[in-house]
Amino acid sequence: MKETELKNGTIDLIWNGYSKTPAREKSVLFSQSYLSNSQVVITRKKSNITKIADLTGKKVGLQQGSSGQMLYDEKPQLLKQRVKETVLYDTFNNAFLDLKAGRIDAIMGDSIYINYYVRESGEKEQYQLVETPFMPETFAIGMRPQDQQLKGRIDAALKSLEANGTMTKLSERWFQEDLSIPEK
């Protein structure tokens, strides 16, 4: 829906943890990338799931329409073929509620969001993060292909924020590490 709303002019930008992917680049103009991200799996520690192989026969949640779901479907041999069932959620919050209640065994999603959620939940000791074999990705701002002038202004602003250290400060404040991507 995000891309449709952008195309129809309902919104002007997609700017909330929006992964830059080859599939999306076919219909969306992207700013320069500004944050690095990866897909991780989160489980409850008591599940004893510590590696991807441990997900064999388990129930895994994904956010519908996310880059995680795209990767999961595009490269089924990495994870999808192992699991018993996939549950799609409209939001990560709903997936976390089901994980916490034991209705699913794991969630695959953006490391940035999952790490933030776990830290803010105050229950960090109850969760286990598992690295996935999916390639790292980056977050960028999506806009309509004809918005070249807007792209130029956004890229200039991102370069300025990187140059003056603001991107690093914001990343460290919210993620406890510098995940910003330096200008190339």
Image (cartoon, helix red, strand yellow):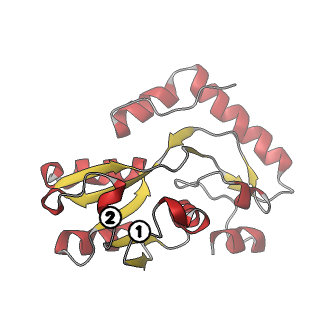
Q: Residue at x 54, y 43 (%)?
A: 136
* Rendered image quadrant of residue 95: bottom left
**Which mark is first along the chain, 2 or 1?**
2
Q: Which residue is mark 2?
A: 55
- SS label for mark 1: loop
Residue 24 pos. (x, y %): 71, 60
Q: Which mark is residue 183?
A: none
Q: Residues within 10 Å of mark 2 (few under 14, many from 20)?
A: many
Q: Amino acid at mark 1?
A: Arg
Q: Is residue 70 above or below residue 20?
A: below
- The residue depicted at 32 percent of the width and 64 percent of the height is 55
**Which x, y percent locates residue 66?**
53, 65
**Viewer-proximal residue among 9 and 181:** 181
Q: Residue at x 58, y 26 (%)?
A: 162
* Labels 1 & 2 near each other (Cβ < 8 A): yes
State whether residue 164 is above or below residue 11: above
| Residue in the image at 48% along x and 49% along y | 133
Amino acid type, residue under disc 2 in the picture: Leu
* As drawn, 34 above or below 104: above
Secondary structure at numbered mark 2: helix
Residue 97: quarter of image: bottom left
Alpha-carbon distance for marks 1 and 2?
A: 7 Å
Crowding around mark 1 (Cα neighbors within 10 Å: few <14, some 14 to 19, many 20+) is some
Report the side of 141 relative to 16 (left or right). right
Location of residue 175 in the rendering, given as x and y in whole percent from the top left corner:
36, 39
Of 23 and 53, which appears nearest the observer?
Answer: 53
Indicate the quadrant containing the C terminus: top left, top right, bottom left or bottom right: top right
Q: Is residue 46 left or right of residue 118?
A: left
Q: Which residue is mark 1?
A: 82
Q: Position of residue 161 (x, y in %)?
A: 58, 28
Is residue 173 placed above or below 9 in the rendered structure?
Answer: above
